[in-house]
Amino acid sequence: MKLELHENRSYENLDYVEKEISKQEFIKCLFKTCDFSNGKLVNSEFTDCQFINCNLSMTKIETTGLKNIFFQNCKLIGVDFSNCKDFLFSVCFENCILDYSFFHKKKLKNTVFRRCSIKEANFSATDLTNSQFPDCDLSLTQFDNTILNGVDFTTSYNISIDPEMNRMKNAKFSLNGLPGLLEKYGIIIE
């Protein structure tokens, strides 16, 4: 399958609402203030790209590669990243809304989620080894059979994680995060 190549390009104010991007390859491209909401990214490749102030809410990503992708000030509500290609999958999020997103079985080692809203997201069976969640709201986010070894949650809040259902060696929490680790035991911490 031959992909149409786009390299070192900038795209601004694109309106791709409910549209499909298929069989495209983007290398070192910048997407600024673009709207891809309710659209599809299909059989495409994105490498070393940046998405700034973009809306990708409810975008369906199917057999598409995301390699070293930086999202800043983006809405990614309800995005299912589990259908992305696994090969070299690498993303970073800053000031993003990732509510209701799905990362099932993704390898997200060393991933940074900085100042993000990650409410009711799903990280089941995900490898988050050595990832960071500085200043993130993790309300009702699901961690089940997740590898959380070395993950830094020290400035995250609204955390609820069952230590018996996840691997958590050397994970870091502040005292404020302690109730979310013990809530299943019905312990009151004041």
Image (cartoon, helix red, strand yellow):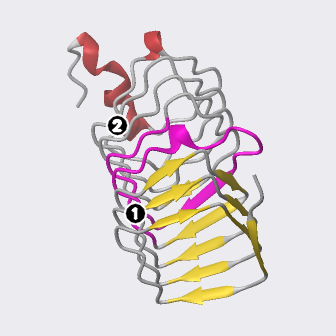
**Could you say which is closer to the camera, residue 23 or residue 118?**
23
Local crowd at mark 1 within 10 Å, few (<14), some, or many (≥20)? Answer: some
Residue stretch rendered in magenta on the structure: 74-103
Q: Quadrant of residue 36?
A: bottom left
In the displayed structure, would residue 84 be above or below residue 17?
above
Image x and y of residue 39, in percent: 40, 63
- The amino acid type of the residue labelled 1 equals Gly
Name the main secondary structure of what is drawn in magenta.
loop
> Going by the image, does 77 lie left or right of 149?
left
Image x and y of residue 7, in percent: 79, 78
**In front of the other: label 1 or label 2?**
1
Number of dots carrying numbers: 2
**Could you say which is closer to the camera, residue 32 or residue 20?**
20
- The numbered mark at residue 39 is 1
Say what secondary structure mark 2 lies in.
loop
Q: Which residue is mark 2?
A: 141
Image x and y of residue 96, in percent: 44, 64
In the displayed structure, would residue 78 be above or below residue 116?
above
